[in-house]
Image (cartoon, rainbow, N blue to C red):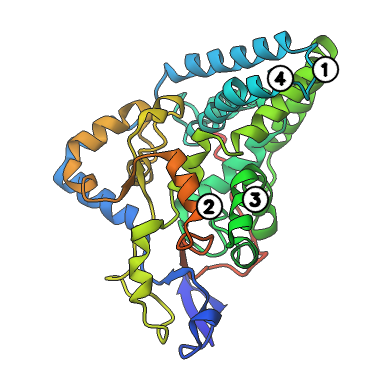
Amino acid sequence: MSITHRTNNKTYKTETPPADAPIEILNQFYWTNEQEPHVQRRKLILKRHPEVSKLTGYEPKTKWYVIGVVLLQLTVAYLLRKTPLNSWKFIVTAYVIGATANQAIFLAIHELSHNLLFKKPIHNKLFAIFANIPIGIPYLALFQPYHQLHHKFLGDAYLDTDLPTHWEGILLSNVLGKVFFACCQIFFYALRPMFITQIQFTYIHLLNIIGQVLADVLVVKFMGVRALGYFIMSSFLAGLLHPCAGHFIAEHYVLNENNNSRREFDAKKVNIPPELLPAETYLYYGPLNKLTWNVGYHNEHHDFPYIAWTKLPELRRIAADFYDPLPHVDSWCGVIWWFCFNDVNTLWNRVKRTGKEKHGTKVSCKLDEN
């Protein structure tokens, strides 16, 4: 069966299973035609708490913290320049200091993708190229445009590349598959988008690639190849079984008891009805937010993506009547454990919406360079 819908005077068709197909064919994603919740909640919050609008805008002091993290990574890389990569000293340092610092840099680039460090967008883009240096690869070019799509088309089957693919769900929903996924999240987030949705290549991408290659060459020239190895290992370990990496799963996976709605799901319906649809964005208010720019305030962030990390706790305080009822997790480490070893948690546990673009269609997602 094909679903036809019109958007901006254009007609799109998406192939879906027949309504009477068994649940195995319908697959186990939470398919819905309901709109994502953040736009509506933002309107309601602004209507009831108009003072929230005063919280929007960039946070100028963030750049100093980011510079400090970059200098920390450069210093540690210099100190390890003569240490073997396979030594315990090198690996433990890369895990404890390097992975934590690079996770902070990943999420600093996330803040920069929303233009929350400088007033002018172009300054955010250029600073992100500098912040990218300790990651070792041109992460900005891979992340920024796809993250814009994630916010604009949350849950869209073809435009939100944060979602696992059908084949990931099939191959990686057993215990070993989930452990592999949890250990290699950084590769899935970096490589998956290129197989799902194409984006427009801009000079910012080119500058990121050139700048990172130049930085890597200088690091190898003046500090040695082991220093660059420290950057790469730090980035890999940041997406491994690291406490801060729990946010990747905690943000949008429907975990544990929140899966109850699927057990009530009538297999003869293609779309889960709104009264059974689980929440798709989750909260974490624990201490690791201090190392990750308050990314645990994730409903607040999706509701108001142009409020900087320092003001998200104030947003939550003002609009507590909206956020208190929403589901939250108490531990990112616990999230990784529950995801891997609780049978009810799989890669299928995401809310998906019928896509508005054919798979493989090139999407114009040009970075705002003004």
Q: Answer above or below: position of 290 versus 162.
A: above
Q: Is residue 19 visible?
A: yes
Q: Secondary structure at mark 2?
A: helix
Q: Is residue 81 left or right of residue 235?
A: right
Quadrant for the N terminus, please: bottom right
Residue 90 disc label: 4
Between discs 4 and 1, the one toward the N terminus: 4
Q: Are marks 1 and 2 in contact (CB under 8 Å)?
A: no
Q: Answer above or below: position of 102 versus 199.
A: above
Circle 2 residues within 10 Å: few <14, some 14–19, many ≥20: many
Count the numbered circles shown.
4
Task: Give the labeled residue for mark 3.
Answer: 180
Q: Are marks 2 and 4 in contact (CB under 8 Å)?
A: no
Q: Answer above or below: position of 318 versus 168.
A: above
Between discs 4 and 3, the one toward the N terminus: 4
Between discs 1 and 3, the one toward the N terminus: 3
Circle 4 residues within 10 Å: few <14, some 14–19, many ≥20: many
Q: For the residues marked 1 and 2, what is the alpha-carbon distance in whole angstroms?
A: 38 Å
Which amino acid, by three-letter code, is at mark 3?
Phe
Task: Give the labeled residue for mark 1.
Answer: 220
Q: Secondary structure at mark 1?
A: helix
Which amino acid, by three-letter code, is at mark 4?
Phe
Q: Is residue 150 left or right of residue 56?
A: right
Picture coordinates of residue 43, whole percent (x, y): 25, 51
Task: Give the labeled residue for mark 2.
Answer: 340
Q: Is residue 233 left or right of residue 256?
A: right
- Residue at horizontal 53 percent and vertical 75 percent from the top: 27
Circle 1 residues within 10 Å: few <14, some 14–19, many ≥20: some
Q: Answer above or below: position of 97 versus 318.
A: above
Q: For the residues marked 4 and 3, what is the alpha-carbon distance in whole angstroms?
A: 23 Å
Q: Are marks 4 and 3 in contact (CB under 8 Å)?
A: no
